[in-house]
Image (cartoon, rainbow, N blue to C red):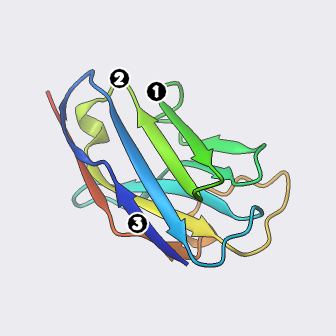
Amino acid sequence: VQLQAFGGGTVQAGGSLRLSCAASGHILNSYIMGWFRQAPGEEREFVAAMRLSGGRIWYGDSVKDRFTISKDNFKFTVYLQMDSLRPEDTGSYYCTIRQRPSYSGYAYTRNDDYDDWGQGTLVTVSS
């Protein structure tokens, strides 16, 4: 599976950006796709994820009520709509996918829950 992310850029605080991640290869609706981010000198942080079959969605605490993850199954693409951006949202955003079986009741928010990663796309929020 290959992942290609688009949509990073520079925006002022309070603004919005939309990231896209297109998956190619053998994709099943049972997979989970999502986003992590990493600021300079910081660990990679969970942002949001969702099952391609629909249903469960998870958000990191710092982005709840500001970011929205969505999908287009026909294109195997997930989107991350980021609103009310803050300078602390600055970082490289990485798209990721989990191909291993997943289980209801478990929140897939750890780096090692995921199998493949796309290249990062840089988001810079100026104050």
* 66 lies left or right of 100: left
* Amino acid marked by disc 2: Ser
The residue where tag 1 is placed is 66
Q: Position of residue 119 (x, y in %)?
A: 34, 69
Relative to 95, 77 lies left or right: right
Label 1, label 3: how far apart the Cα atoms are: 23 Å
Q: Position of residue 127 (x, y in %)?
A: 14, 27
Which residue is at a point 32% across and 63% down the rendered structure image?
Answer: 120
Q: CA distance from mark 1 to mark 2?
A: 6 Å
Residue 97 coordinates in the image, percent (x, y): 58, 67
Where 82 sits versus 108, above or below?
above
Q: Amino acid at mark 3?
A: Gln
Q: Nearer the viewer, residue 87 or 41?
A: 87
Element type at mark 2: loop
90 over 119 or under it: above or below? above
Residue pointed to by mark 2 = 84
| Amino acid type for the residue under numbered disc 1 | Arg
Crowding at dot 3, Cα within 10 Å, few <14 / some 14-19 / many 20+, comes out as: some
Among numbered discs 1 and 2, the one appearing first in the sequence: 1
Query: Which residue does the image show at 67% across and 57% down from the upper left?
Result: 108
| Residue under numbered circle 3 | 4
Per the image, label 3 sits on a secondary structure element best described as: strand
- The residue lying furthest to the front in this view is 74
> In the figure, residue 11 lies in which quadrant?
top left
Q: Earlier in the sequence, mark 3 or mark 2?
A: 3
